[in-house]
Image (tube, grey):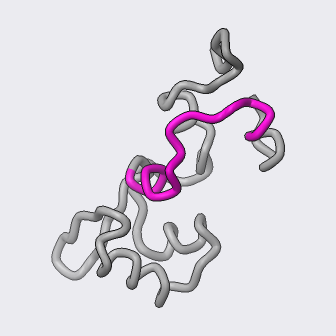
Amino acid sequence: MYDNNNGLLSPRDAYRLMLKEYPDVMDIEQMCEALGISTKTGYKLLKDGKIEYLKIGRAYRISKAHILHYLKITCTTSTELAAYGIDT
């Protein structure tokens, strides 16, 4: 399921593995916790357009897919994921 012939993960599998303990759509606090950054830095990333978001009223909603896009994670090897402590 996770490895293809080249030892790379598909973007879909990377999506399933990365940030798996977080919901598919996060609030600003969850995003900052997942990225290990302060909320001030999180708001700056959103304001600067580095991470796409949806604003509902005064609340920000950020999809996991947009966070992975920001991190430039589209596919990676299972060995690289293991280095981050992610089991494949």
Question: Does 26 sit left or right of 84 as displayed?
Answer: left
Residue 22, placed above or below residue 11:
below
Quadrant occupied by the C terminus: top right
Q: Nearer the viewer, residue 37 or 26?
A: 37
Asked whether, in this view, residue 21 is left or right of residue 77, the answer is left
Most extreme residue toward the front is: 6
Residue 71, placed above or below residue 56 = above
45 or 85, which lies in front? 45
Residue at the outermost bottom position? 40
Q: Residue at x 36, y 65 (%)?
A: 51
Depicted 8 relative to depicted 52: above or below: above
Region of the chain picked out in magenta, as a range: 66-80
- Residue for point 16% across, 77% down: 57
The quarter of the displayed image where residue 38 is located: bottom right
Where residue 46 sits in the image (x, y, percent)?
34, 75
- Residue at horizontal 80%, vertical 33%? 79
Residue 2, x across and y down, in percent:
65, 20
Measuring from the top left, give residue 77's x and y in whole percent: 70, 31
| Residue 58 magenta | no
Q: Looking at this view, name the residue that lies furthest to the left.
A: 57
